[in-house]
Amino acid sequence: MGFRRKLHVAALWLAVALLALSLSAAGASSVTVVLENDTFVHPTKAATLAGFFAELNLSLPAEYISEQRLALSAPPPGTLRLPRLAVARVSELESIPSPLSYRLLPTQKDARIEVESPGVPGQKRNTATYFYLSGELVGERRHSEVVRQPKPRVILLYRMVGREYTPSVEEILRLRRLASREWKPPLRYKRKLTMEATAYEPGPHSNGPWATGYTSSGLKAGYGVVAVDPKVIPLGTRLYIEGYGYALAGDVGGAIKGNRIDLCYATVEECYQFGRRDVVVYVLD
């Protein structure tokens, strides 16, 4: 009995699998439509011919359906011939305007407006399909698809802040190079040091083949994050470095001991260009 029961269960599961496969195949079928002036293949999920006509947004007269012996309740055939039915297609490209985006930024220079990115318009293709039976319109379908996404037009709004203003840690990490271009040396600071400076970049050239792109403090390496000796400058300290800008002490290095500082740049070329030099460092925190 146990063996027969297993055979019965196996047969039941096989039947279920075949039914699922059949339904899946039915859901992914296609119909070749032969018209008076065109032949096209249309993928369909319709279970009946009436549903297939609904997908095409096609309304055929009852007399035509009777004349062609079309069984609306039956599944759509693999090939469907519709004599005297013609199709016309119209396609056009439409421009999608670039969205407008604003960024509000502080500056110790003049307040102003700049265009960071002019934007690129997108493009959309609009397609219309018209069905005519003996010259009479019996169906119409419209379809739109984006062929190129628009890129936003970015406007920078610089608001003027006073000389006593210094960026926060979040602003230093967010603005990076902007902090050196738009802000002057701070009026108030704790210490002013002259330090020997070198340069590094986040990749394997400076940090070896196992470089992760993150500093020892967990920050993402990049312009504005510098390596220091924590005994001289504690990690997390905000700094202003002449010729470099505002920065954050966020990393350490085996060779960065005592009165040395290592400035992060984006590329190896920038590091070579910087070389080794003395810099004035303002300690803010």
Image (cartoon, rainbow, N blue to C red):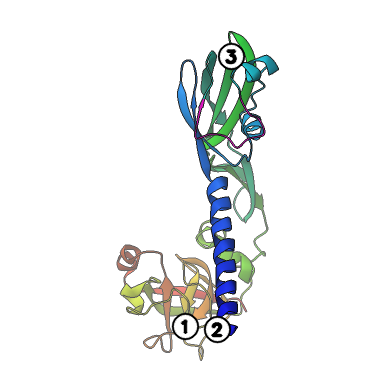
Residue 184 visible: no
The numbered dot on residue 132 is 3
Magenta stretch encompasses residue 71: yes
**Looking at the picture, which amino acid does disc 2 mark?**
Leu
Q: Do the residues labelled 1 and 2 touch (CB within 8 Å)?
A: yes
Foreground tag (3 vs 1): 3
Q: Tell me which segment is drawn in magenta.
A: 70-80
Residue 212 location in percent, x, y?
43, 76
Q: Left or right: where does residue 112 sit relative to residue 32?
A: right
- Helix, strand or loop at disc 2? loop
Residue at x 59%, y 42% (from the top left corner)? 45
* Above or below: residue 274 compared with residue 235: above
**Looking at the picture, which amino acid does disc 3 mark?**
Tyr
Q: Residues within 10 Å of mark 3 (few under 14, many from 20)?
A: some
- Helix, strand or loop at disc 1? loop
Residue 80 visible: yes
Magenta stretch encompasses residue 181: no
Q: Distance between the residues labelled 1 and 2?
A: 8 Å
Q: Distance between the residues labelled 3 and 1?
A: 78 Å
Task: Residue lying at the far front in this picture: please name it.
Answer: 1
Relative to the observer, which residue lies in front, 22 or 151?
22
Which mark is first along the chain, 2 or 1?
Answer: 1
**Looking at the picture, which amino acid does disc 1 mark?**
Val
